[in-house]
Amino acid sequence: MTNIHRRAFIFFSFFIAIIFIGFFQSWNVALGIFNLCIISAIMALGVNIQLGYAGIFNAGVMGFAALGGLAAVIISYPPVPETIELGGSGVFLSLVILFVGTATVTFIYKSSLSSSIKKLTVPLTILMLLILFNLVGSPAIERIEAFEPAASGFLGGFGLPIILSWFVGGILAGIVAFLIGKLTLGLRSDYLAIATLGIAEVIIYFLKNEDWLTRGVKNVNGLPRPVPYEVDLQGNAWFIEFCDKYNFPLVETSSIVVKISYCLLFSGILITIFILSEIALKSPWGRMMRAIRDNEISARAMGKNVKARHLEIFIIGSAIVGLAGAMLTTLEGQFTPTTYQPLRFTFTVWVMVIIGGTGNNYGSLIGGFLVWFLWVEAEPLGLYLVELFTSPLSDTNPLRIQLITNAAHMRYIMMGLLLLLVLRFAPKGIFPEGR
Amino acid sequence: MFLHAKNMVGGYGETTILNNCSINVKQGEIAVIVGPNGAGKSTAMKAIFGMLDLRQGNVFFDGEDITYLSPQDRVKKGMGFVPQTNNVFTSMTVLENLEIGGFTNLDKIKSNIKEIFNLFPILEEKQKQIVGELSGGQRQQVAVGRALMTNPKLLMLDEPTAGVSPIVVKELFEKIINIAKAGIAILMVEQNAKQALEISDNGFVLVQGENKFTDKGMTLLENREVRKAFLGG
Amino acid sequence: MDFFNAIALITNFILLPGLTYGSQLALGALGVTLIYAVLRFSNFAHGEIMSFGAMVCILFTWLGQSYGVSFGFLPTALLFVPVAMIFTILYCMLIEKFVFSYYRKKKSNPIIFLIASIGVMFFTAGLIRFIIGPSDQSFNDGVRFIFTVREFKTLTGLNEGFGLKTSQAITILTTIILCSLLFFFLNSTRTGKSMRAFSDNEDLALLSGIDPNKVVLLTWIIAGGLATFAGVLYGLDKIYKPFIFLQMLLPIFSAAIVGGVGNPLGAFIGGYIIALSELFVTFAYKKVLGYLLPENLEPTTMMQFLSTDYKFAVSFIILVIVLIIKPTGIFSGKTI
């Protein structure tokens, strides 16, 4: 029982901290932080499935989160008819070429032809594929990107409800994870980390540069929301009446209501994923995964297909991260490829999982909550510390000004220290595995 | 007594492998530890060299209690050890392997290398070659050479002939006799029990971590019980 | 003539930048590979250590410049590299003492080391941004060119030419000198051989009386020193950006792995392989082919294999191909 008490106490303390922020900073800020805490916890659950259940080091979390963001754009943004007319068919045709070509290459590669013929035909087919792809694709892409580049210059999306994108984001991340996993999962753990770190960079570069798809660094703004807009609420007669009745400030209340709606939606997803993860962890499948993680050789000797199991887990974990990524883009209402930084996305999520307790879903939950909370609150805290330590210096002292402007970067220092201290003194994290 | 390991008890973790085992080696003689698989032969060797903490018993070397010395310190006292596996620096040349062995005694490096080349002429021929590219028997010679570079008074060999061809086994044993003739005591663990006992002065037959028989090598070879149990009749 | 024009173009846009960038990668990869060889883990903090070295050098350069120190036509920063090296090496030693030595004594799994190195990476990244801020810093105050493209053209009368930047010459020369010293040290000195022996077979090295603490300390000294040079030279050649060093981890690790991780010669060659392939693959060959091909065959497109934006993809692809085909790398590093 003490274990459950401990868990309850830690979660309770966290909610107290959020309520504290609500009273002393503002409820808007508190809810804003909490919404991102939920998204962080979902990402942490996804990474925990990989790192905790199976010991797979995925350093490409950032890439999968960004793919979720891409899904949000493609699903929800209204289509741009002009660009589709200009280059839609070209892009579609080149995609068809890509699929047919990939299928051909795979077919040749897997066929029973002799290896010398394969050595000749496979690169040749790939080369032809690339040339054809470029010939059809490039002019279409140029036409698309040339159309009103300041406002549009991309194909747009399907104009569907954005909630749909959460699942599409998961599926997209899952498909990419399948391809990457096929390529890299046989590698040793640190090579896998390096390779996935690389693939995430490549994905981000793709999103930054393929303007026809994502507008690149010009960003996609104004994604539709799954919840009401503040302005609409402020114009709603019932809502105005409601605020008058309880004497709430109209503008602030509207934004709090929006945040609460997000919070409810996100909590639903979080709870669902958490329950599913717990079921998976306790199922024979979860036990097998841990058995493989703890002793790969003997698991293989017992006839387990380690690579296939790892691929499964890599896809599932990455899909959850993709889903969380789509939720994040939904919350922000815009897709900005430049914000995807490995420190912020990949390694912070690792810190969440490790601090919470690798292999324990409750751990990932609290890890996601706590670390995101600290990540945000590190800025005021850092500023406070810097001001405290530099208070003997005058206000115009260049060192003091320099330190105060850079105080926000205390969060990296804090993340590093936190990770190092936990790894050293409590390597099993807040909630150790299996307890 | 030159090496005197007395009533050793020890093992890995909870399991006890050595059970009141004693090994003695006199100056300049060849001693061999033989016995069935899992008798604790290699473990006894490791215990003598300080790679295994003893629960009971003592190791005396050259009149000094060395029970609590680290392996590195035992090297400085004059013990040389050739492990059964990973006993050479595979990515380095023959000459470099020997040089590294001699880092404990810098002023004698040149003369020691010369002596080792005299003992193992093939190593002089291949001195610039990477050890990883040598044959199994040549590698064993490098390993023994590296250990000799530390100027040991006692050379300990853990199954020096494991995995080398029968002709090379014979050659290696001849080299070992030559080393002993130079005044270096030798303690080795051997699978080729018959051949090893033939060249040894003293033999120790271990069974389940205990001394079963201890006698002159030739006497052990003639002992009917020993022959029946370990030497195949 | 056309042939020489083509050569000049390739020299200007591929060869010189490639050798320069390759040198920077080689210096970084050498540090990674040495730490891997001796401490047996992939150090994710290495990029940030390079950044740290460059930062210290920039700070001292500013200080020096405020007192009117200058190094003639060479960048002032070069004068302060030794100071920066000392600080970086001290920082590395502090990391070893407070972070890695604990796991080393416990003989922890390499993955624990890797996670610890990510902690160090976070900490160092924060420290750097805290001290110097997140923005770009340009600190190359020397003469920019040894000779410019225009000077080359007037000298030779060719249509195309190549210019040699001071930073390129400094980078390539420094790297050659540093690497020669390093290889001499590793192959011909007693301490260097001890280091190689320790990396080859730790237990046997201990039996040969090699002091592990000394070897580890030395490894950090060399890795820290080389990282400082790599960071400063990269900053001089391009610009100092605090966040670029995390991105450079990928090409640096690729260089080390392609050459055979744990093998210094491999890391050196690997750096140039990665850098040159990046440039070869992302270079637009239109002009070059225009000179080489008969007039009627002149290409109309850019003749580029891959857009420049994807240069990171090149190192990734090389990395994956090597890991799948020959995971020990070209020069057969350690596979453990």
Image: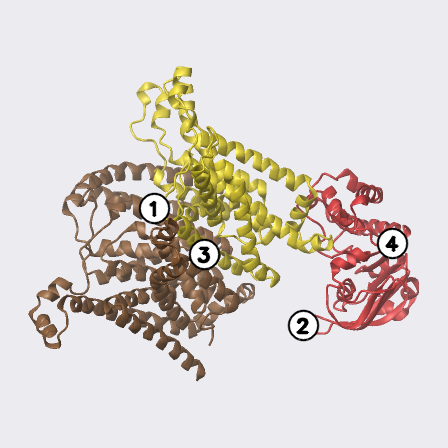
> Cα distance, mark 2 to mark 3?
39 Å
Chain in brown (letter): A
Which of discs 2 and 3 lies nearer the camera? The answer is 3
Judging by the rendered image, the residue that carries numbered circle 3 is C123
Do pointers 2 and 3 mark residues of a single chain?
no
Do pointers 1 and 4 mark residues of a single chain?
no
Chain in red (letter): B
Can the viewer see residue A8 in this picture? yes
Q: CB under 8 Å between callouts 2 and 3?
A: no
Q: Position of residue C285 (x, y in %)?
A: 36, 29
> Cα distance, mark 1 to mark 2?
53 Å
Do pointers 4 and 3 mark residues of a single chain?
no
> Cα distance, mark 4 to mark 3?
55 Å
Q: Circle 3 sits in a helix, a strand or a loop, which is it? A: helix
Judging by the rendered image, the residue that carries numbered circle 1 is A205
Q: Circle 2 sits in a helix, a strand or a loop, which is it? A: loop
Relative horizontal placement of residue C333, taking residue A234 as reference (left or right): right
Quadrant in which the N terminus of chain C is drawn:
top left
In the image, what residue type sits under mark 3? Phe
In the image, what residue type sits under mark 4? Ile
Identify the subunit bearing mark 3: C
Identify the subunit bearing mark 1: A
Q: Position of residue A243 (x, y in %)?
A: 12, 73
Judging by the rendered image, the residue that carries numbered circle 4 is B184
Question: Callout 1: 10 Å neighbours few (<14), some, many (20+)?
Answer: many
Q: Circle 1 sits in a helix, a strand or a loop, which is it? A: helix
Q: Circle 4 sits in a helix, a strand or a loop, which is it? A: loop
> Cα distance, mark 3 to mark 1?
26 Å
Which residue is located at x 50 percent, y 39 percent?
C80
Judging by the rendered image, the residue that carries numbered circle 2 is B13
- Colour of chain C as rendered: yellow
Q: Earlier in the sequence, mark 2 or mark 4?
A: 2
